[in-house]
Image (cartoon, grey):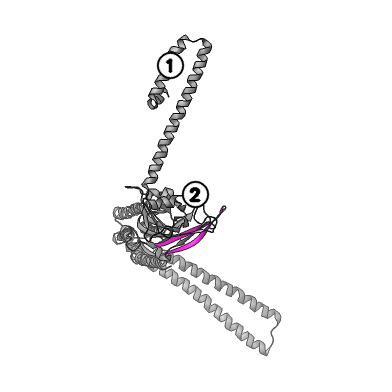
Amino acid sequence: MAHSLSAVYPLSYGLQAQKLQPTQKLLSPTMKETALCECFIVQIVLKSLNLLFISRIMDGSVASTEEILPPTIQKLMKGYNKYLRPFFGNGPVTVGMSLDIASIDTISEINMDYTATIFLRQRWTDERLCFDGNKSLSLDGRLVELLWVPDTFIVDSKKSFLHDITVENRLIRIFPNGTVLYALRITTTVACSMDLTKYPMDRQTCMLQLESWGYNVKDVVFYWTRGNQSVSGLDNLQLAQYTLEDHYTSESEAVYETGNYPKLIFHFKLKRSILYFILETYVPSSALVVLSWVSFWISQSSVPARICIGVTTVLTMTTLMMGARTSLPNANCFIKAIDVYLGICFSFIFGALIEYAVAHFCTLHQPNAANAYMYGQEMQDREDEMNGIVTSIGSHTLRARKREEMLSRMGSVSNPTPSESKEEINSSQPQSRCTKCMSTTRRIVRCLYCCKVENPHYIDNYSRLTFPLSFIFINLLYWTYYLYF
Protein backbone atom coordinates (compact mmCIF):
# COMPACT_ATOMS: atom_id res chain seq x y z
CA MET A 1 0.00 0.00 0.00
CA ALA A 2 2.90 2.31 0.73
CA HIS A 3 4.25 1.73 -2.76
CA SER A 4 0.91 2.60 -4.38
CA LEU A 5 0.57 5.78 -2.30
CA SER A 6 4.11 6.85 -3.03
CA ALA A 7 3.46 6.36 -6.73
CA VAL A 8 0.47 8.69 -6.61
CA TYR A 9 1.83 11.23 -4.11
CA PRO A 10 5.63 10.64 -4.16
CA LEU A 11 6.70 13.97 -2.75
CA SER A 12 4.40 14.20 0.23
CA TYR A 13 4.84 10.61 1.20
CA GLY A 14 8.65 10.86 1.05
CA LEU A 15 8.76 14.02 3.16
CA GLN A 16 6.63 12.47 5.83
CA ALA A 17 8.91 9.46 5.97
CA GLN A 18 12.00 11.56 6.22
CA LYS A 19 10.55 13.65 9.05
CA LEU A 20 9.40 10.72 11.10
CA GLN A 21 12.51 8.59 10.94
CA PRO A 22 15.01 10.90 12.79
CA THR A 23 12.40 12.11 15.22
CA GLN A 24 11.66 8.59 16.46
CA LYS A 25 15.27 8.19 17.59
CA LEU A 26 15.20 11.27 19.93
CA LEU A 27 11.73 11.02 21.41
CA SER A 28 10.69 9.24 24.58
CA PRO A 29 8.35 6.21 24.49
CA THR A 30 5.30 8.41 25.14
CA MET A 31 6.25 10.76 22.36
CA LYS A 32 6.92 7.77 20.09
CA GLU A 33 3.35 6.57 20.54
CA THR A 34 2.06 10.05 19.70
CA ALA A 35 4.21 10.14 16.59
CA LEU A 36 2.96 6.74 15.48
CA CYS A 37 -0.65 7.90 15.84
CA GLU A 38 0.07 10.95 13.76
CA CYS A 39 1.66 8.73 11.08
CA PHE A 40 -1.38 6.48 11.04
CA ILE A 41 -3.67 9.49 10.60
CA VAL A 42 -1.56 10.74 7.72
CA GLN A 43 -1.80 7.35 5.98
CA ILE A 44 -5.60 7.34 6.30
CA VAL A 45 -5.79 10.79 4.76
CA LEU A 46 -3.54 9.73 1.89
CA LYS A 47 -5.74 6.66 1.24
CA SER A 48 -8.82 8.85 1.11
CA LEU A 49 -7.18 11.15 -1.39
CA ASN A 50 -6.19 8.14 -3.51
CA LEU A 51 -9.77 6.80 -3.60
CA LEU A 52 -11.08 10.24 -4.52
CA PHE A 53 -8.62 10.42 -7.36
CA ILE A 54 -9.67 7.01 -8.71
CA SER A 55 -13.38 7.87 -8.52
CA ARG A 56 -12.79 11.01 -10.53
CA ILE A 57 -11.03 8.96 -13.18
CA MET A 58 -14.02 6.56 -13.37
CA ASP A 59 -16.46 9.46 -13.63
CA GLY A 60 -14.46 10.73 -16.53
CA SER A 61 -14.66 7.34 -18.32
CA VAL A 62 -18.44 7.23 -17.89
CA ALA A 63 -18.74 10.72 -19.19
CA SER A 64 -16.61 9.79 -22.19
CA THR A 65 -18.88 6.76 -22.88
CA GLU A 66 -21.94 8.96 -22.86
CA GLU A 67 -20.21 11.35 -25.21
CA ILE A 68 -19.71 8.45 -27.68
CA LEU A 69 -23.48 7.86 -28.00
CA PRO A 70 -25.32 10.03 -30.53
CA PRO A 71 -27.38 12.90 -29.08
CA THR A 72 -30.65 11.17 -30.04
CA ILE A 73 -29.73 8.00 -28.12
CA GLN A 74 -28.49 10.06 -25.18
CA LYS A 75 -31.84 11.79 -25.05
CA LEU A 76 -33.72 8.47 -25.22
CA MET A 77 -31.58 6.83 -22.55
CA LYS A 78 -31.91 9.76 -20.15
CA GLY A 79 -34.13 8.54 -17.33
CA TYR A 80 -34.80 5.19 -19.08
CA ASN A 81 -35.21 2.21 -16.72
CA LYS A 82 -34.64 -1.09 -18.50
CA TYR A 83 -35.97 -3.03 -15.50
CA LEU A 84 -39.54 -1.80 -16.07
CA ARG A 85 -41.52 -3.05 -19.02
CA PRO A 86 -43.30 -0.63 -21.39
CA PHE A 87 -46.77 0.53 -20.29
CA PHE A 88 -45.95 -0.50 -16.74
CA GLY A 89 -49.19 -0.13 -14.76
CA ASN A 90 -51.18 0.74 -17.92
CA GLY A 91 -52.00 -2.69 -19.33
CA PRO A 92 -49.96 -5.41 -21.07
CA VAL A 93 -47.40 -4.86 -23.78
CA THR A 94 -48.09 -6.70 -27.06
CA VAL A 95 -45.17 -8.49 -28.68
CA GLY A 96 -45.44 -9.63 -32.30
CA MET A 97 -43.21 -12.46 -33.51
CA SER A 98 -42.12 -13.96 -36.82
CA LEU A 99 -39.75 -16.78 -37.73
CA ASP A 100 -37.42 -17.49 -40.60
CA ILE A 101 -36.33 -21.15 -40.71
CA ALA A 102 -32.77 -21.21 -42.01
CA SER A 103 -32.31 -24.99 -41.78
CA ILE A 104 -33.49 -28.15 -40.06
CA ASP A 105 -30.27 -30.06 -39.69
CA THR A 106 -31.16 -33.40 -38.10
CA ILE A 107 -34.31 -35.25 -37.09
CA SER A 108 -33.43 -38.07 -34.72
CA GLU A 109 -35.80 -40.97 -34.05
CA ILE A 110 -33.51 -42.32 -31.34
CA ASN A 111 -33.52 -39.13 -29.26
CA MET A 112 -36.91 -37.97 -30.59
CA ASP A 113 -35.82 -34.42 -31.33
CA TYR A 114 -34.82 -32.12 -34.17
CA THR A 115 -32.17 -29.42 -34.55
CA ALA A 116 -33.04 -26.18 -36.34
CA THR A 117 -31.43 -22.80 -37.00
CA ILE A 118 -33.96 -19.98 -36.88
CA PHE A 119 -34.13 -16.19 -37.08
CA LEU A 120 -36.46 -14.98 -34.34
CA ARG A 121 -37.86 -11.48 -34.78
CA GLN A 122 -39.81 -9.69 -32.05
CA ARG A 123 -41.62 -6.35 -32.28
CA TRP A 124 -43.13 -4.25 -29.52
CA THR A 125 -43.83 -0.61 -28.78
CA ASP A 126 -42.08 1.28 -25.98
CA GLU A 127 -43.53 4.76 -25.45
CA ARG A 128 -40.33 5.86 -23.73
CA LEU A 129 -38.34 5.49 -26.96
CA CYS A 130 -40.38 7.83 -29.17
CA PHE A 131 -38.35 10.51 -30.96
CA ASP A 132 -38.77 13.12 -33.69
CA GLY A 133 -37.95 12.15 -37.24
CA ASN A 134 -39.03 9.85 -40.04
CA LYS A 135 -36.14 7.38 -40.13
CA SER A 136 -35.44 4.40 -37.93
CA LEU A 137 -32.30 4.00 -35.87
CA SER A 138 -30.22 0.85 -36.35
CA LEU A 139 -28.13 0.27 -33.25
CA ASP A 140 -25.28 -2.03 -32.41
CA GLY A 141 -26.47 -5.33 -31.00
CA ARG A 142 -24.42 -4.78 -27.86
CA LEU A 143 -26.66 -1.84 -26.90
CA VAL A 144 -29.47 -4.30 -26.20
CA GLU A 145 -28.16 -4.36 -22.64
CA LEU A 146 -29.52 -0.83 -22.23
CA LEU A 147 -33.11 -1.67 -23.28
CA TRP A 148 -35.97 -3.74 -21.97
CA VAL A 149 -36.52 -6.90 -24.06
CA PRO A 150 -39.10 -9.71 -23.71
CA ASP A 151 -38.02 -12.79 -21.76
CA THR A 152 -38.96 -15.21 -24.53
CA PHE A 153 -37.76 -18.82 -24.31
CA ILE A 154 -38.20 -21.99 -26.38
CA VAL A 155 -40.28 -24.67 -24.70
CA ASP A 156 -38.93 -28.28 -24.81
CA SER A 157 -35.51 -27.02 -25.85
CA LYS A 158 -32.74 -29.44 -24.92
CA LYS A 159 -29.82 -27.31 -26.05
CA SER A 160 -29.66 -23.84 -27.61
CA PHE A 161 -27.05 -21.21 -28.34
CA LEU A 162 -26.83 -17.75 -29.85
CA HIS A 163 -24.39 -17.32 -32.73
CA ASP A 164 -21.56 -14.94 -31.91
CA ILE A 165 -19.27 -14.97 -34.97
CA THR A 166 -17.92 -12.42 -35.63
CA VAL A 167 -20.10 -10.63 -33.09
CA GLU A 168 -23.30 -11.69 -31.38
CA ASN A 169 -25.96 -12.07 -34.07
CA ARG A 170 -28.40 -9.50 -32.70
CA LEU A 171 -30.27 -6.70 -34.35
CA ILE A 172 -31.82 -3.64 -32.66
CA ARG A 173 -33.83 -1.12 -34.63
CA ILE A 174 -35.90 1.70 -33.10
CA PHE A 175 -38.63 3.51 -35.06
CA PRO A 176 -39.85 7.08 -34.39
CA ASN A 177 -43.15 5.87 -32.90
CA GLY A 178 -41.29 3.83 -30.27
CA THR A 179 -41.53 0.46 -32.03
CA VAL A 180 -38.54 -1.77 -31.35
CA LEU A 181 -37.40 -4.57 -33.68
CA TYR A 182 -35.25 -7.18 -31.97
CA ALA A 183 -33.88 -10.08 -34.05
CA LEU A 184 -31.77 -13.09 -33.01
CA ARG A 185 -30.10 -16.00 -34.77
CA ILE A 186 -30.52 -19.17 -32.69
CA THR A 187 -29.64 -22.85 -33.15
CA THR A 188 -31.74 -25.07 -30.92
CA THR A 189 -32.43 -28.76 -30.36
CA VAL A 190 -36.10 -29.27 -29.53
CA ALA A 191 -37.89 -32.42 -28.36
CA CYS A 192 -40.51 -33.89 -30.69
CA SER A 193 -42.77 -36.75 -29.64
CA MET A 194 -43.00 -39.29 -32.47
CA ASP A 195 -45.39 -42.15 -33.17
CA LEU A 196 -43.31 -44.83 -34.92
CA THR A 197 -45.97 -47.53 -35.28
CA LYS A 198 -46.05 -47.01 -39.07
CA TYR A 199 -42.30 -46.49 -39.51
CA PRO A 200 -41.05 -46.03 -42.25
CA MET A 201 -44.44 -45.03 -43.71
CA ASP A 202 -45.10 -42.62 -40.87
CA ARG A 203 -46.01 -38.96 -40.70
CA GLN A 204 -44.78 -36.84 -37.81
CA THR A 205 -46.02 -33.50 -36.45
CA CYS A 206 -43.42 -31.45 -34.57
CA MET A 207 -43.82 -28.11 -32.83
CA LEU A 208 -41.77 -25.06 -31.93
CA GLN A 209 -43.29 -23.32 -28.90
CA LEU A 210 -42.40 -19.83 -27.67
CA GLU A 211 -43.40 -18.64 -24.20
CA SER A 212 -42.73 -15.80 -21.80
CA TRP A 213 -40.71 -16.88 -18.79
CA GLY A 214 -41.66 -14.35 -16.13
CA TYR A 215 -44.44 -12.13 -17.52
CA ASN A 216 -47.96 -13.56 -17.46
CA VAL A 217 -50.83 -12.65 -19.77
CA LYS A 218 -51.58 -9.56 -17.65
CA ASP A 219 -48.14 -8.14 -18.46
CA VAL A 220 -47.26 -9.44 -21.94
CA VAL A 221 -49.35 -10.66 -24.89
CA PHE A 222 -47.78 -12.62 -27.77
CA TYR A 223 -49.18 -12.73 -31.32
CA TRP A 224 -48.03 -13.78 -34.79
CA THR A 225 -47.44 -10.71 -36.92
CA ARG A 226 -48.85 -12.20 -40.15
CA GLY A 227 -50.69 -15.35 -39.08
CA ASN A 228 -49.56 -18.46 -40.96
CA GLN A 229 -47.35 -16.26 -43.14
CA SER A 230 -45.27 -15.33 -40.11
CA VAL A 231 -43.03 -18.35 -40.71
CA SER A 232 -40.91 -18.26 -43.86
CA GLY A 233 -38.00 -20.17 -45.36
CA LEU A 234 -39.79 -23.54 -45.59
CA ASP A 235 -40.22 -23.48 -49.36
CA ASN A 236 -36.47 -23.81 -49.96
CA LEU A 237 -35.95 -26.30 -47.14
CA GLN A 238 -34.35 -29.63 -48.12
CA LEU A 239 -34.49 -32.56 -45.69
CA ALA A 240 -32.70 -35.90 -45.95
CA GLN A 241 -35.49 -38.37 -45.14
CA TYR A 242 -38.58 -36.18 -44.96
CA THR A 243 -40.73 -33.96 -47.10
CA LEU A 244 -42.62 -31.05 -45.57
CA GLU A 245 -46.35 -31.59 -46.07
CA ASP A 246 -47.96 -28.71 -44.20
CA HIS A 247 -47.33 -26.05 -41.55
CA TYR A 248 -49.49 -23.65 -39.58
CA THR A 249 -49.35 -21.40 -36.51
CA SER A 250 -51.52 -21.09 -33.42
CA GLU A 251 -51.79 -18.98 -30.27
CA SER A 252 -52.43 -20.37 -26.82
CA GLU A 253 -51.80 -19.93 -23.11
CA ALA A 254 -49.53 -22.02 -20.91
CA VAL A 255 -51.12 -22.79 -17.56
CA TYR A 256 -48.75 -23.29 -14.64
CA GLU A 257 -49.03 -23.06 -10.89
CA THR A 258 -47.66 -19.52 -10.99
CA GLY A 259 -50.22 -18.28 -13.54
CA ASN A 260 -51.12 -18.19 -17.23
CA TYR A 261 -48.39 -17.25 -19.68
CA PRO A 262 -48.63 -16.34 -23.39
CA LYS A 263 -47.62 -19.03 -25.88
CA LEU A 264 -47.08 -19.14 -29.64
CA ILE A 265 -46.90 -22.51 -31.42
CA PHE A 266 -45.55 -23.34 -34.85
CA HIS A 267 -46.69 -26.75 -36.18
CA PHE A 268 -45.09 -28.49 -39.15
CA LYS A 269 -45.95 -31.93 -40.57
CA LEU A 270 -43.30 -34.23 -42.01
CA LYS A 271 -43.70 -37.26 -44.26
CA ARG A 272 -40.90 -39.79 -44.40
CA SER A 273 -39.50 -40.77 -47.80
CA ILE A 274 -39.87 -44.53 -48.16
CA LEU A 275 -37.72 -45.06 -51.25
CA TYR A 276 -34.54 -45.47 -49.21
CA PHE A 277 -36.12 -48.16 -47.03
CA ILE A 278 -37.53 -50.01 -50.04
CA LEU A 279 -34.06 -50.30 -51.55
CA GLU A 280 -32.33 -50.92 -48.23
CA THR A 281 -34.70 -53.30 -46.43
CA TYR A 282 -37.86 -54.35 -48.26
CA VAL A 283 -36.27 -55.51 -51.54
CA PRO A 284 -33.46 -57.54 -49.88
CA SER A 285 -35.84 -59.22 -47.44
CA SER A 286 -38.27 -60.14 -50.24
CA ALA A 287 -35.36 -61.48 -52.31
CA LEU A 288 -34.32 -63.72 -49.41
CA VAL A 289 -37.85 -65.12 -49.21
CA VAL A 290 -37.81 -65.94 -52.93
CA LEU A 291 -34.36 -67.48 -52.53
CA SER A 292 -35.67 -69.81 -49.83
CA TRP A 293 -38.21 -71.19 -52.34
CA VAL A 294 -35.41 -72.52 -54.55
CA SER A 295 -35.15 -75.54 -52.25
CA PHE A 296 -38.62 -76.70 -53.40
CA TRP A 297 -37.15 -77.53 -56.81
CA ILE A 298 -34.19 -79.45 -55.40
CA SER A 299 -34.46 -83.21 -54.90
CA GLN A 300 -35.24 -84.34 -51.39
CA SER A 301 -32.26 -86.66 -51.50
CA SER A 302 -29.92 -83.61 -51.74
CA VAL A 303 -29.89 -83.00 -48.02
CA PRO A 304 -26.76 -80.76 -47.82
CA ALA A 305 -27.97 -78.43 -50.59
CA ARG A 306 -31.41 -77.85 -49.15
CA ILE A 307 -30.17 -77.48 -45.58
CA CYS A 308 -27.48 -75.02 -46.74
CA ILE A 309 -30.05 -72.81 -48.51
CA GLY A 310 -32.41 -72.85 -45.54
CA VAL A 311 -29.81 -72.06 -42.88
CA THR A 312 -28.10 -69.40 -44.99
CA THR A 313 -31.31 -67.52 -45.70
CA VAL A 314 -32.34 -67.67 -42.03
CA LEU A 315 -28.99 -66.26 -40.84
CA THR A 316 -28.97 -63.55 -43.53
CA MET A 317 -32.49 -62.53 -42.60
CA THR A 318 -31.50 -62.30 -38.94
CA THR A 319 -28.58 -60.01 -39.82
CA LEU A 320 -30.87 -57.82 -41.92
CA MET A 321 -33.34 -57.50 -39.06
CA MET A 322 -30.59 -56.47 -36.64
CA GLY A 323 -29.25 -53.86 -39.06
CA ALA A 324 -32.69 -52.34 -39.59
CA ARG A 325 -33.09 -51.73 -35.84
CA THR A 326 -29.79 -49.93 -35.26
CA SER A 327 -31.24 -46.54 -36.28
CA LEU A 328 -34.36 -46.91 -34.14
CA PRO A 329 -35.02 -46.48 -30.40
CA ASN A 330 -34.68 -49.58 -28.28
CA ALA A 331 -37.99 -49.02 -26.52
CA ASN A 332 -40.43 -51.90 -26.76
CA CYS A 333 -43.48 -49.67 -26.80
CA PHE A 334 -43.46 -49.48 -30.60
CA ILE A 335 -44.19 -52.40 -32.92
CA LYS A 336 -43.15 -50.75 -36.16
CA ALA A 337 -44.35 -51.54 -39.65
CA ILE A 338 -40.87 -52.53 -40.75
CA ASP A 339 -40.66 -54.99 -37.85
CA VAL A 340 -43.94 -56.58 -38.97
CA TYR A 341 -42.66 -57.01 -42.53
CA LEU A 342 -39.32 -58.42 -41.44
CA GLY A 343 -41.17 -60.81 -39.13
CA ILE A 344 -43.34 -61.99 -42.04
CA CYS A 345 -40.30 -62.58 -44.23
CA PHE A 346 -38.51 -64.43 -41.45
CA SER A 347 -41.57 -66.65 -40.93
CA PHE A 348 -41.67 -67.60 -44.62
CA ILE A 349 -37.96 -68.37 -44.70
CA PHE A 350 -38.14 -70.41 -41.53
CA GLY A 351 -41.27 -72.14 -42.86
CA ALA A 352 -39.39 -73.22 -46.00
CA LEU A 353 -36.75 -74.82 -43.80
CA ILE A 354 -39.40 -76.60 -41.72
CA GLU A 355 -41.12 -77.78 -44.92
CA TYR A 356 -38.05 -79.74 -45.96
CA ALA A 357 -37.74 -81.24 -42.47
CA VAL A 358 -41.34 -82.48 -42.68
CA ALA A 359 -40.92 -83.81 -46.22
CA HIS A 360 -37.72 -85.63 -45.32
CA PHE A 361 -39.34 -87.13 -42.22
CA CYS A 362 -42.27 -88.41 -44.27
CA THR A 363 -39.88 -89.91 -46.80
CA LEU A 364 -38.24 -91.99 -44.08
CA HIS A 365 -41.55 -93.28 -42.64
CA GLN A 366 -43.60 -93.89 -45.79
CA PRO A 367 -43.40 -96.69 -48.45
CA ASN A 368 -41.01 -96.08 -51.27
CA ALA A 369 -42.03 -94.61 -54.57
CA ALA A 370 -42.49 -98.02 -56.24
CA ASN A 371 -45.16 -99.04 -53.69
CA ALA A 372 -46.75 -95.61 -53.40
CA TYR A 373 -49.41 -96.45 -55.95
CA MET A 374 -50.31 -99.72 -54.25
CA TYR A 375 -50.48 -97.90 -50.94
CA GLY A 376 -52.87 -95.42 -52.44
CA GLN A 377 -55.06 -98.22 -53.88
CA GLU A 378 -55.21 -99.87 -50.48
CA MET A 379 -56.40 -96.62 -48.92
CA GLN A 380 -59.06 -96.31 -51.64
CA ASP A 381 -60.30 -99.86 -51.01
CA ARG A 382 -60.62 -99.12 -47.32
CA GLU A 383 -62.61 -96.02 -48.04
CA ASP A 384 -64.91 -97.95 -50.42
CA GLU A 385 -65.41 -100.57 -47.73
CA MET A 386 -66.41 -97.92 -45.25
CA ASN A 387 -68.76 -96.45 -47.84
CA GLY A 388 -70.37 -99.88 -48.32
CA ILE A 389 -70.94 -100.33 -44.61
CA VAL A 390 -72.55 -96.95 -44.30
CA THR A 391 -74.67 -97.60 -47.41
CA SER A 392 -75.99 -100.91 -46.03
CA ILE A 393 -76.83 -99.26 -42.73
CA GLY A 394 -78.59 -96.49 -44.58
CA SER A 395 -80.69 -98.98 -46.61
CA HIS A 396 -81.66 -100.83 -43.45
CA THR A 397 -82.77 -97.54 -41.92
CA LEU A 398 -84.82 -96.78 -45.03
CA ARG A 399 -86.64 -100.14 -44.78
CA ALA A 400 -87.39 -99.44 -41.12
CA ARG A 401 -88.93 -96.11 -42.04
CA LYS A 402 -91.15 -97.71 -44.71
CA ARG A 403 -92.26 -100.27 -42.18
CA GLU A 404 -93.24 -97.50 -39.76
CA GLU A 405 -95.28 -95.81 -42.48
CA MET A 406 -97.12 -99.05 -43.25
CA LEU A 407 -97.88 -99.64 -39.59
CA SER A 408 -99.20 -96.14 -39.23
CA ARG A 409 -101.53 -96.69 -42.18
CA MET A 410 -102.71 -99.98 -40.76
CA GLY A 411 -103.23 -98.34 -37.39
CA SER A 412 -105.76 -96.04 -38.97
CA VAL A 413 -107.86 -99.15 -39.74
CA SER A 414 -107.19 -101.09 -36.55
CA ASN A 415 -105.64 -99.46 -33.51
CA PRO A 416 -102.61 -101.42 -32.27
CA THR A 417 -102.10 -102.11 -28.64
CA PRO A 418 -99.82 -99.72 -26.66
CA SER A 419 -97.27 -102.45 -25.98
CA GLU A 420 -96.78 -103.13 -29.74
CA SER A 421 -96.26 -99.44 -30.60
CA LYS A 422 -93.69 -99.03 -27.85
CA GLU A 423 -91.69 -102.03 -29.12
CA GLU A 424 -91.53 -100.62 -32.65
CA ILE A 425 -90.37 -97.19 -31.41
CA ASN A 426 -87.72 -98.76 -29.21
CA SER A 427 -86.42 -100.89 -32.12
CA SER A 428 -86.09 -97.86 -34.45
CA GLN A 429 -84.18 -95.65 -31.95
CA PRO A 430 -81.00 -97.84 -31.74
CA GLN A 431 -80.86 -97.99 -35.53
CA SER A 432 -80.90 -94.17 -35.88
CA ARG A 433 -78.23 -93.79 -33.18
CA CYS A 434 -76.03 -96.34 -34.90
CA THR A 435 -76.37 -94.47 -38.19
CA LYS A 436 -75.24 -91.21 -36.61
CA CYS A 437 -72.24 -92.87 -34.98
CA MET A 438 -71.14 -94.44 -38.28
CA SER A 439 -71.42 -91.16 -40.16
CA THR A 440 -69.32 -89.40 -37.53
CA THR A 441 -66.72 -92.17 -37.70
CA ARG A 442 -66.59 -91.85 -41.45
CA ARG A 443 -65.90 -88.11 -41.22
CA ILE A 444 -63.09 -88.65 -38.72
CA VAL A 445 -61.48 -91.30 -40.94
CA ARG A 446 -61.65 -88.97 -43.92
CA CYS A 447 -59.94 -86.22 -41.96
CA LEU A 448 -57.20 -88.63 -40.93
CA TYR A 449 -56.75 -89.73 -44.53
CA CYS A 450 -56.46 -86.09 -45.63
CA CYS A 451 -53.69 -85.49 -43.10
CA LYS A 452 -51.97 -88.65 -44.18
CA VAL A 453 -49.25 -88.02 -46.79
CA GLU A 454 -49.50 -90.65 -49.48
CA ASN A 455 -46.41 -89.47 -51.40
CA PRO A 456 -43.82 -87.17 -49.69
CA HIS A 457 -42.88 -85.71 -53.07
CA TYR A 458 -46.28 -84.04 -53.23
CA ILE A 459 -45.27 -81.78 -50.33
CA ASP A 460 -42.78 -79.91 -52.53
CA ASN A 461 -45.34 -79.66 -55.32
CA TYR A 462 -47.89 -78.10 -53.01
CA SER A 463 -45.28 -75.75 -51.48
CA ARG A 464 -44.25 -74.41 -54.90
CA LEU A 465 -47.73 -72.98 -55.26
CA THR A 466 -48.78 -72.35 -51.66
CA PHE A 467 -45.79 -70.30 -50.50
CA PRO A 468 -45.74 -67.71 -53.35
CA LEU A 469 -49.53 -67.20 -53.31
CA SER A 470 -49.56 -66.77 -49.54
CA PHE A 471 -46.68 -64.29 -49.66
CA ILE A 472 -48.36 -62.21 -52.38
CA PHE A 473 -51.66 -62.17 -50.48
CA ILE A 474 -50.01 -61.09 -47.21
CA ASN A 475 -48.09 -58.35 -49.04
CA LEU A 476 -51.34 -56.97 -50.44
CA LEU A 477 -52.85 -56.85 -46.97
CA TYR A 478 -49.69 -55.30 -45.49
CA TRP A 479 -49.27 -52.46 -47.99
CA THR A 480 -52.98 -51.71 -48.11
CA TYR A 481 -53.22 -51.37 -44.35
CA TYR A 482 -50.10 -49.27 -43.73
CA LEU A 483 -50.52 -46.97 -46.73
CA TYR A 484 -54.25 -46.25 -46.59
CA PHE A 485 -55.31 -46.81 -42.95
Is residue 139 in sight in this rendering?
yes
Q: Is residue 362 left or right of residue 36?
A: left
Front residue of 141/387: it is 141
Q: Is residue 219 left or right of residue 309?
A: right
Front residue of 473/122: it is 122
Residue type beneath disc 1: Lys
The quarter of the picture where residue 418 lies is bottom right
Residue at 44% x, 16% y: name it: 20
From the image, tell me which residue sits under label 1. 19
Task: Give the mark toward the camera: 2 or 1.
Answer: 1
Query: Any magenta on residue 341?
Result: no
Residue type beneath disc 2: Tyr
Q: Position of residue 483 (x, y in %)?
A: 39, 66
Q: Main secondary structure of the magenta part?
A: strand
Front residue of 391/10: it is 10
Question: Which is nearer the N-term, disc 2 or disc 1?
Answer: 1
Q: Position of residue 439 (x, y in %)?
A: 52, 72
Q: Position of residue 200 (x, y in %)?
A: 38, 60
From the image, tell me which residue sits under label 2. 83
Q: Position of residue 344 (x, y in %)?
A: 39, 60
The disc label shown at residue 43, or none: none
Specify the quadrant that holds the C terminus: bottom left
Q: Which range of residues does the magenta coloring cover? A: 248-270
Front residue of 147/123: it is 147
Q: CA distance from mark 2 to mark 1?
A: 55 Å
SS at badge 1: helix
The quarter of the picture where residue 105 lies is bottom left
